[in-house]
Amino acid sequence: MATKPSAVEVRAYQVGFGDCFLLSFVYRKNEKRHVLIDFGTTELPKRGKLKPAEHMRRVADDIKAVCGGKLSAVVATHRHRDHISGFATDGESAGSGKVIAECNPSVVLQPWTEDPRAARDARVATRDSSRSPRSFLAGLTAMHKIAGQVFLHAASPPRAMSVALAKQLRFLGMDNIKNTSAVNNLIAMGQKGTAVWAHHGSNSGLERVLPGIKIHVLGPPNLEQSEKIRKMRSNDPDQFWQLLGGSRSLKSMGIARGGQPTVGVHRNLPVPVEARWFRDRLAVMTGEQLLQIVRLLDDQMNNTSLILLFEVGRKKLLFPGDAQIENWSYALEDAPNAAATRKLLADVDLYKVGHHGSRNATPKKLLWEAFKNRGKPNGRRLLTLLSTLPGKHGKSEKHTEVPRRTLLEALEAESELKNTHTLSFAEDAKLCHKIEMKIGR
Amino acid sequence: MRSERNREGSGVRPLPGNRRISVIAQDPSVKDAKGRILMAKIEIPAENLMPGPSGYRVQVVDYDSSTGRYYGAHVLPQDFDEELKAWREGEQPIVKDYRFHAQNAYALVMKTLARFEFALGRRVGWAFKVHQLKVAPHGLMDANAFYTRKEEGLVFGYFPSRTHGTVYTCLSHDVVVHETTHALIDALRERYLDPSGPDQAAFHEGFADVIALLSVFSQVELVEELLRRSSKSRRKGYLSERDVQPEALRESALFGLAEQMGEEIQAVRGEALRRSARLEPSSKWLTNSEYLEAHRRGEIFVAAIMNGFIRAWTARISLHKAKDERLHALRVVAEQGADIAAALVTMWIRSLDYMPPVHIEFGDALSAAITADSEVRPDDSRFGLREHMLASFAAYGIKPASKQSDGMWDPAPGGLDYNRVRFESMRSDPDEVFRFLWENRQQLGLREGAYAKVLSVRPCTRVGVDGFTLHETVAEYYQVAHLTPTEFVPRGLRLPEEYVAQLKREQSDALKRRRKRLRGARDKEEPSTEGAEAESDPTTPIYGGGVLIFDEYGKLKYHVHNDLFGSRQTERLQYLWETGLLRAGAKGAELAVGRLSDVHRSRAIAMRRLPMEGW
């Protein structure tokens, strides 16, 4: 086998609001190595008649066909549904996860926050008052619980909650609910092959299966790393989630039930006339508060995303998952090797646009404006991949729409953009954009 | 009912003005020597309450919107003596007694309101048009509590504790006072929630923390308990010399309370006390990037005042110590501390009247406090509060905004014209005050060509040094101008370059979209761009304004003023742009109005924003 690839093929699959990329490194004509980066969706375009389960199964079958039944690695950048739902083996995705498992990935790469051994500890260690990995992970677990409650709340919204707000809550709640089947499948695949949980600067474990390729793990920072820059912050951001989610059973204390007075009140009385105006206002405001919480929760989870840079010969391919600025800022600003990282990223050839094109996931000055290949003539021009579904996330009047209009304009103007949204969504349509890059030896 | 009883046999005895009522001294985790919840007996205005409780200024609505459950209109004991023993003595069941929760929240809101009215010498209305502030003691399940102008109320959340039971924010003295103070600042300075410089956003939080913490420290029971715990003296009821040194008092009172406070409730509050007590005096914090975040910057303000409190307290103790005395009576030291805390609360509440209505900065707040206090209480020899405040603020690099050596505001300019205004009318009528402004616009430095409005005219009464009652008037006005980028230049102001570029891009994009629409509508005919081109340049608003303090003769005593085209505006606009609060839209500037609930949450999770990296 050749020691270095001569080309790379990148497939960006249409998965609606989600991510699914297949990287195929061509070593010889019939010798390729394949890496699947993320496989999930929260919502598919309305255009087709396909059910999500059927569609994800078709994508899985296509991946299996392309890789000839063997994946060198599977990367799950973070735990959000829109990045991992396809790995589920239950009926929800028509067994698409089984198809991937049949491809026997040699390496399963995930961020350090997904280490199942730590998670087991996390359940018993939630009382940690100091900031520790376990308490951080327990915070993430608490988030899933909140997300589940939020989803249920918005599924049968109170009378005063607007339709638009309930829709947003359902969408964000759904994306943050723990996807047990997919998580278990990733663990199982990792046990069968080699599981790697990475953080900034750590080994990706991919070099072993991808000879001649250098893989840099740029994010997420682990707690030890991010703590160094947080000397002046004394309270734990993750503690907040534990406060909300609680380590004790949310089932009995959750949004669905509330506190428990034991003295002096009869419960659930009719609301008197003079209190009704305020009651209705409260109901609306509570929905807004939930949205705020669930947004922060969503950001927090996005910031556990792996940021991977593949260096193949002179070509560089950057896959940052959904990392937002707080994750990026460690690699680009705060890490001891930040200057070297910025230099390394300046001549990226292919950039997978972070977080479906949201406003906070492509650092404007530190990353985008530093890309040298922006605006170059065809052939040497920066390639960008965007996997998105407009109209699902955020609001344009608040400049939070995904994809963000100004970013999209910059991508269109200064790079060669492949947007999965432009792929038609019919049974006979092609499933992905395919890009081929030659690599000079 | 007691009121009925009092009315029987007409004219027997007038109704009492105040009543005593039990509240939790800090929160349920602060216990007394016997392990019971430490309670305090406070005085609040007496009134004939309706079930709710619903009074003349506060309406408690015990509705939980997370569960959709209404817990009923609570009927409170009419008098301290009618309270349950468990309430008076702080037995554990009160933590789950929603009727007590309602009393605790009601009493602390009323106490805070009464403190403001006492300090300002007048009724203080809410920022909205109705008389009653709504209070939801169990409004939603959330580790948050906040004031909301839109909903005209205070919302207290509750959340499952990590260890045991539920944490109720309505049971925390400092949380209730903090939120009520937000409501009262908003009532007195409605523009302080607007985007401005870093200090203004921090001020709302910092000031609410200050009033809340000083309110907690003004309870003798609590101060006594804190001192007792850390006392090194072998004699019961006494403190040693070491116990009353500044460092020891900071340790026993400030850190002592922070240690006692419920850990989880502190997380909600962003650990205001612990962190401000830990913030060592230095001018470096003001320019530190982390302290440019509103929720951190407020800590500097809190630290300056709480350290000033310790300074004044220790000075007072040493002043009253006989030479050969080695021990200090614990009760006396506690009372001195509580008295100074109470005096400081009054001083800082009074200062609000002397603060500019827009763009408050810490230096303005300091000058306002010094001036207000000197006016009402010229003799400061007892506590030396002004001196200690100036020294403590200086240690954090905060100088009074006025140029006067004593930190007081400059006297009003001379040469003002009073001939065309009517004295009586000026005391309550915004139109009359506006006429005064208009006639004297040049002397007062108002900018022509900008919109001006009198926001409020408030008569206030205070007792003069000679014991006679004085009537003064405080009026606020503001000015606003919406300017195009080119109009900023001749006024000596500069907009951030990137912002102007973005405005241009947004405008041309909007124009393109409009042309496209027109083309579509006219069935691909060559469109006339007339009309589209005529769109005016996008504008950006800037604000200024001032406060006018008139003496009992209707003459202007102080004019605290932020010039609409002042030199600080350029810096402010740059800050707003960098923090993402000012954005460029197709029709001009878009200013993000912050919500207090967001600020609290950002504070709880120590959020870091990098808006310049966003799209």
Image (cartoon, coloured by chain):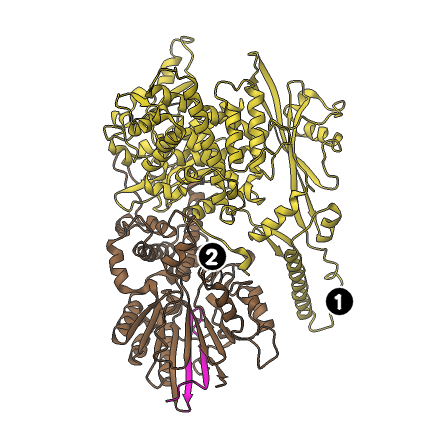
Q: Classify mark 1: helix, strand or loop.
A: loop
The residue drawn where x is 53% and y is 73% is: A347
Give the quarter of the image for residue B328.
top left
Q: Which chain is yellow?
A: B
Q: Give the range drawn in magenta.
A: A1-29
In the image, which disc is placed on residue B528? 1
Subunit of mark 2? A
Give the quarter of the image for residue B435.
top right
Q: Which chain is brown?
A: A
Front position in the image: B173 or A319: A319
Front position in the image: A160 or B244: B244
The residue drawn where x is 57% and y is 74% is: A373
A317 above or below A200?
A: below
Q: Classify mark 2: helix, strand or loop.
A: helix
Question: Which residue, as the protein is rendered here, is positioned at the far front?
Answer: B324
The residue drawn where x is 60% and y is 40% is: B359
Quadrant of the frame with the N terminus of chain B: top left
Amino acid tagged 1: Ser
Crowd band around label 2 with a 10 angstrom C-alpha radius: few (<14), some (14–19), many (20+): few
Subunit of mark 1? B
Question: Which residue, as the protein is rendered here, is positioned at the far bottom?
Answer: A29
In the image, which disc is placed on residue A164? 2
Name the spot of residue B344 as percent of width and height, x first: 48, 26
Amino acid tagged 2: Ala
B324 above or below A100?
A: above
Confirm whether residue B443 shows in the render: yes
Question: Is residue B317 found left or right of B538 in the rendered image?
Answer: left
Front position in the image: A316 or A147: A316
